[in-house]
Image (cartoon, rainbow, N blue to C red):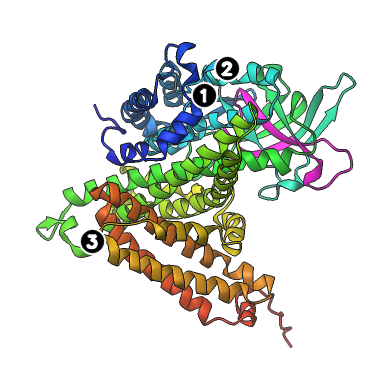
Amino acid sequence: MGNFYKDNDTLKHYLNHPMMEKIVELKERNFADKDKYDYAPQNFEDAMDSYDKVLEIVGDICANVIAENAEEIDHEGPCVKNGRVVYAAGTERNLDACRKAGLMGMSMPRKLGGLNFPITPYIMAADMVSRADAAFENIWGLQDCAETIYEFADDTQKEKYIPRVCQGETMSMDLTEPDAGSDLQSVMLKATKKEDGSYVLNGVKRFITNGDSDIHLVLARSEEGSKDGRGLSMFIYDKRNGGVNVRRIENKMGIKGSPTCELVYKDAPAELVGSTRLGLIKYVMALMNGARLGIAAQSVGISEAAYREALSYAKDRKQFGKAIIEFPAVAEILSTMKAKLDASRALLYACSRFVDMYKIYDDIAKERALTPEEKKEQKYYSKLADAFTPLAKGMTSEFCNQNTYDAIQIHGGSGFMKDYTCERLYRDARITSIYEGTTQLQVVAAIRHVSTGTYLNKIKEFEAEPVHPADEAIKNTLVFMTQQYADAVQAVFGVDDQGFHDFMARRLVEMAGHIIMGYLLLEDVQRNEEFRKSLEVYVKYGQAQVAQHASFIGNFRPEQINDYLYKEEPVSEEA
């Protein structure tokens, strides 16, 4: 009997991060629930013990139920019958196990039926579920849509819907349409207000993950005659009320167990969330922050699975009289995979802690006025969460794709066959850098934190932290990389040319990412020597990447952008 929590000590390392004490005390309001609920923690140590035990349950279910069903689900997949989604049999078994274990609505308050977990241990659960089966994470993990109801819906809606999620009902966020993918301000699904003040929805949604869920969050156009994001509002649609049918399930490359649906809304009753006109401007933006963090967790989980598959195969596979792991070319691939995995996880949990802090302060602010010091911290962590969520989603998803590619490479021809798990992981990984905003869109979200100095300021905070004498040389390397980054930022933004800024944005964001991930691993080594090899390998890797980008930027003239732009070649007429 395996366990995906007990066999991965890095999860306990991050669960026991020094910031967790403050996160837990704020989340628990200094343990105010201890006399109201018999399962509420009495103190910090009790809370940590609770997280540890629940995560052990998650690890057991992941290893012995979800992972065991993954291959069967990948082959069987969901189907549509009479306008409804029918999950694969293994998916139903997965959901049943999670419901019985009380693993739905984990971050919701106890008064609404949840476990009141901070985001960080919830993301650890998502990390493990994704390692077991990334497709199932797209069903189980959408419980975090309940955060949007909790943050923005009225009390009646919270009390109506959140307990249902905690009891195991599923959720979806219905945003995209046939003519509105990443450009959500083009959404045209129509919300019509009736005389009694209620709404009905009409139109089509496409590419909706888990689209036949029990409870939907729907972005729709409520303002007649509007054409941009200011005319969009957010609605709750309850499947019990009818009015929505599944037209089809997309035939996808990967994550095949997760139904990606085209939905037809026909006079579907819906409830307005919050205020009109704020659907995209406020509510979807908050929703997307959580979605980015979720995909980062999914990416890390897939990376973990890919690395383990590659390592196991390299130890067992014999060529020329010895295991292939003994060949330097293979050993280098594995070491780099592990370094990218550890760097990804370090970034993921740094980001989750920042999200925890700002969300908790936002929640407290609904109950009482924040002190000046709390307001300062709220602003600080809100900015870091805004900066780190696109960075985490972008970097971890790209590394996820690279690690699954390398897992196939280590397997050789066998990796191309469906007999091996790495083939499924490779297909599942590809979507991570596409949905919930492509890597290119994450760069668009992140670049303002390059130009305004958010990343550089955080890097300087890392730089000011003391390290063991043995780590001074690596720290000096990171300091040098930081100077290269600062010089590159100046070189790009010193030119008054928006096109030039946009062209170089990806390189600048990646440079910041490599330095930050290097510092996070350096921070980890101060508490745990197990990260040393990954630190050394990753900083060497990051150093080469930063130098490459610095050289490209330093030797590039803005007018050379034209060499990269597509131009239709004139067609010559034959005489």
The residue furthest front is 372
Residue 462 position, x and y percent, is 42, 57
Comparing 420 with 445, the one in front is 445
Q: Determine which quarter of the picture holds residue 466.
A: bottom left
> Which residue type does callout 3 highlight?
Ala
**Quadrant of the rendered image containing residue 223:** top right
Q: Residue 202 carries which label?
A: none
* Circle 3 SS class: helix
Which of the two discs, 3 and 2, sits closer to the camera? Answer: 3
Spatial CA distance of label 2 from label 1 is: 8 Å
Quarter-of-image position of residue 369: top right
Circle 2/circle 1 CB separation < 8 Å: yes
Of the 4 image quadrants, the one containing the C terminus is bottom right
- What percent of the width, then of the height, locates residue 351? 48, 46
Q: Position of residue 360 (x, y in %)?
A: 55, 33
Marks 3 & 1, CB-CB < 8 Å contact: no
Q: Which mark is residue 105?
A: 1
Q: Which mark is residue 470?
A: 3
